[in-house]
């Protein structure tokens, strides 16, 4: 079970049951309340189940998919909530756990390493006005040219051909 992944499960606990859970955690040296809950669910015998309502406090623990499926299956059989089953399992937990095994109850944590990627800074294009100003400054100023004579436009080809023909006839 130590290689399985876990997922969070939130349920209510009575304050005295939570205190008992914390005391058991200290005594057995469990790293989390989830370890103790996983152990309690794995050894829980639901045959003599008698449930009564009272004030509760909510906690979250991580359970493997096998333990979660076991709880869901039992809750459907007994027609009670998963939380009620968890409370019953924890309530039936003895104060001294002689066979508590940390390796058995604690699944391996996922270890992920984040890759550091250096961000490339994109060069910003200069503003259009700034570019135009720079071009004007960089370009040498043109000298004022003397006025050119007006150039006559060339006559259309057809008109030129007609004029040549008339000139030949004469």
Image (spheres, rainbow, N blue to C red):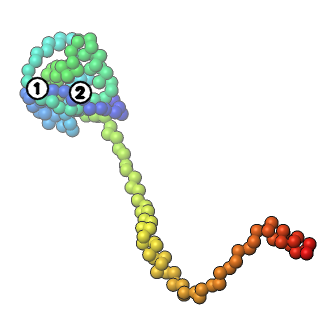
**Relative height, residue 45 to residue 141 (above, below):** above
Q: Quadrant of the N terminus?
A: top left
Q: Quadrant of the C terminus?
A: bottom right
User: What residue is shown at x 14% (from left), y 15% (from top)?
Assistant: 51
Disc 2 from disc 1: Cα separation: 21 Å
Q: Circle 2 — which element?
A: helix
What label sits on residue 39 in the rendered view?
2
Horizontal and vertical percent position of residue 117: 41, 56
Q: Identify the image quadrant of residue 108.
A: top left
Horizontal and vertical percent position of residue 159: 79, 68
From the viewer's perspective, tell me whether residue 92 is left or right of residue 64: left
Pick the front one: 6 or 21: 6
User: What residue is shown at x 30% (from left), y 32% (from top)?
Assistant: 7
The reply to whether the C-beta atoms of the residues labelled 2 and 1 are less than 8 Å apart is: no
**Relative height, residue 45 to residue 123 (above, below):** above
Q: Which residue is mark 1?
A: 56
């Amino acid at each position: 079970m130590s290689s399985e992944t876990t997922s969070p499960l939130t349920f209510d606990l009575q304050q005295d049951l939570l205190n008992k859970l914390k005391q058991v955690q200290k005594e057995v040296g469990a790293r989390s309340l989830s370890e103790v809950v996983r152990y309690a669910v794995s050894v829980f015998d639901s045959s003599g189940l008698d449930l009564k309502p009272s004030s509760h406090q909510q906690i979250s623990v991580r359970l493997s998919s096998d333990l979660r499926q076991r709880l869901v299956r039992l809750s459907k059989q007994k027609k009670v909530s998963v939380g009620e089953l968890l409370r019953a399992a924890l309530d039936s937990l003895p104060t001294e756990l002689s066979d508590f095994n940390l390796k058995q109850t604690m699944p391996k944590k996922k270890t992920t390493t984040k890759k550091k990627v250096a961000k490339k800074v994109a060069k910003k294009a200069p503003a259009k006005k700034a570019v135009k100003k720079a071009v004007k400054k960089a370009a040498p100023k043109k000298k004022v040219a003397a006025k050119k004579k007006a150039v006559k436009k060339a006559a259309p080809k057809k008109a030129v051909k007609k004029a040549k023909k008339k000139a030949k006839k004469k």
